[in-house]
Image: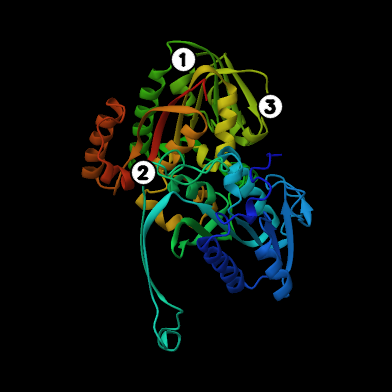
Amino acid sequence: MTKKQVVEGYYLTKKYASLERFITYFHQIDEIRKMNPKRVLFIGVGDGLISDYIKKNTTIQITTVDIDDSLGADVIGDVRALPFEDGQFDLVIAFEVLEHIPFSDFSTALKEMQRVSSSRALVSLPYRNTGFDIIIKFPWIRTLLKKDFLRLNLTKAIRFPGFAVSKQHYWEMDNGKTPKSLVRSVIEQFFVINRQFTATFDAYRTFFVLEKLKHQLENKFAKSYYDTYLGQEKEDYVHARWFATKERLFDYNQTKRAITQAVKSYPEKVDAMLEIGPGDGVWTRCVEKKATHLLLLDQSEHMIERAKKQLKDITHVQFVLTNFAEYKTEKRFDAIFSSRCFEYFTNKQEGLAQMYQLLKKEGQGVIVTKNRSYTSRQPKKDSAMHSMQVTRSQMIGMLEMAGFAVTAVYPATFRWKSSFAVSRVLFGALQWIMVKSKGKIDLPFVTQYAVESYTYEFKKVTNH
């Protein structure tokens, strides 16, 4: 359990009970009122003002929880291990709470909030924002515009002398280690962000109005999907996936080029390598010669069986049937490789933390994963199988937060309208240039939307 970060008596100080704070309280009450929930979990009691107001002035059944046993919470507990049943509350609230735990635990806390919520959540976080706020109010504004006031707001994340992270916080959103894009990407693993706004006259406090994902991709879902699909598939999966059409062959050749380039960053020979989610073993052929011992880990029984058949001539391969999140071993690896598997990780930050622990000192990794910004992905937004992809900047942020140094990023599959031969020639040539330059040559305004999958090379930083 995290130690208390707010000292006794702080809630009585003028610094805490400021004008901005009470304006924030208005936003908190207003959002709760709009949602009109029946059962609310309120995480982090603070000075007790909001929870007391709700209890005394509404019919909402509110339960408070806090790690500080001196604040009078209904339940003493940690947001990372909430002592409640699944879906017990209509609305789960954490106002300026999650910054009081390490960012490495942020996803764990959100996962718990998602678990105990039946539908919605409200979160506010500190954002190292500054800006201008102009409020316009005049007689009859409510009658004419159905608004209390008009707000003109301009904010920008800016660092300047004396504007430092609070000593009571482990982290805050800023334009440094924990940018808003990274924070949003972690939130979106568990919730849909319906709305985001800053408090009036206080750009420092940012609210997220969240809805629980209806079709969240879980490890068991991916396992069930592939086991069922492969159990029904009569033709050769490798051929169907990579060679059945010119477009798929184009993707195969690009991916092979990227992976072949990526594993050159590994030493000439490593003792132990782990491949996560090898599927049919099609990309194992690109990496197996680098390792004296190669362990292939997959949660799909059908994939493991197919990989064994595809790789039966390789004698230094070991197969393990398990979910990576549940994989426990004392063994440490010189290198980790994973292609088109990471997008299925339910908790990506925990997955990267596990990779960090499994790698030896100065160990290296290569991940190929799909790009959330890819334009052709738009029609698939509601599909669970495509709901957990991340953008390039989000992935880099997650890797660095986990303790890795990102050494190169470049396209694995780079395409647009690949059914046309001209398009395949153009994007094939561009991808070749970017791969050979290890991403140093890039067209960011094009690659952001035309790269279907990126290749990430990274190293373990031992002083993390």
Query: Residue 462 vs residue 447: left or right?
Result: right
SS type, badge 2:
loop
The residue wearing badge 2 is 160
Neighbor class of circle 3 (other Cα within 10 Å; few <14, some 14-19, many 20+) is: few
SS type, badge 3:
loop
The type of residue carrying mark 1 is Lys
Neighbor class of circle 1 (other Cα within 10 Å; few <14, some 14-19, many 20+) is: some
306 lies above or below 175: above
Q: Between tags 1 and 3, which lies in front? A: 3
Quadrant of the rendered image containing residue 457? top left
Quadrant containing the N terminus in the rendered view: top right
90 lies above or below 408: below
Which residue is painted at 58% across and 53% down in the image? 96
75 lies above or below 238: below
Q: CA distance from mark 2 to mark 1?
A: 48 Å
Query: Which mark is first along the chain, 2 or 3?
Result: 2
Which residue is painted at 51% across and 55% down in the image? 383
Residue 308 place in picture, x, y as percent: 59, 25
Query: Residue 430 vs residue 203: left or right?
Result: left
Label of residue 148 in the image: none
Could you tell me if the residues under marks 3 and 2 are in contact, i.e. CB atoms within 8 Å? Answer: no
The residue wearing badge 3 is 328
Residue 307 place in picture, x, y as percent: 56, 28
Q: Nearer the viewer, residue 9 or 402?
A: 9
Q: Is residue 110 visible?
A: yes
